[in-house]
Amino acid sequence: MTAVTAPTLAVGVVQHAIIGALSRPGAAVVIPWGERQRFGAAVTAMGFAGYREALAGVAYAYRLGRLSVGTRVGVLSLSVPEQGARARPQGDVGALVALGRRRTVHLGLRTAHAPGARVGAEAPPPLPRLVAVGLGWAASSQLTLLVEHQQSELEATQHLGLDYRPTG
């Protein structure tokens, strides 16, 4: 988020290669505030007839040289026809450091659901805590390759990604 230098609106889809219903369309806006601060908001959704999930949140990021840190808070809404819909608070914090002389490699660390938030006496079980570490390489001003490992209390997953920006 701290790489954004002008107010930006982004619309996109994170495509799931095997199960299309798990793909996540979304939109985000980032507003720079001075040289180092950024404010943002985003919304994503995914699901199918038997399960729907939506996440909306606001974010803040701060850049200090090669290091960027940020936090996001939001509401996660889960809907299962037989069980109804529930919304719960969700948040994460993370850091990103630019490596190398040309700063084309970035190493990131993120944790989500750290407090195991619960709301009310009838609250569902807390979300599983999650820690993620990722590496990104900017092959050009238009193309970034990404790899990430996520570890939660329930499972470990790996992600490969490609970020293409036609306008550079």
Image: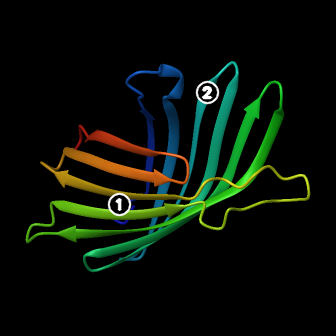
Picture quarter with the N terminus: bottom left
Q: Secondary structure at mark 1?
A: loop
Report x, y in % for residue 6.
Answer: 37, 60
Whether residue 60 is visible here, answered yes or no, is no
Q: How far separated are the C-alphas under marks 1 and 2?
A: 30 Å
Q: Which mark is residue 74?
A: none
| Residue 57 image offset from top left, x and y in percent | 62, 55
Which residue matches tag 1? 4
Q: Amino acid at mark 1?
A: Val
Task: List the residue tagged with mark 2.
Answer: 47
Rendered position, 49 above or below 40: above
Q: Is residue 157 left or right of residue 52?
A: left
How is this picture coloured?
rainbow
Secondary structure beneath disc 2?
Answer: strand
Q: Nearer the viewer, residue 102 or 6?
A: 102
Snapshot quadrant of residue 105: bottom left
Residue sitting at x 11%, y 69%: 100
In this view, 6 is above or below 97: above
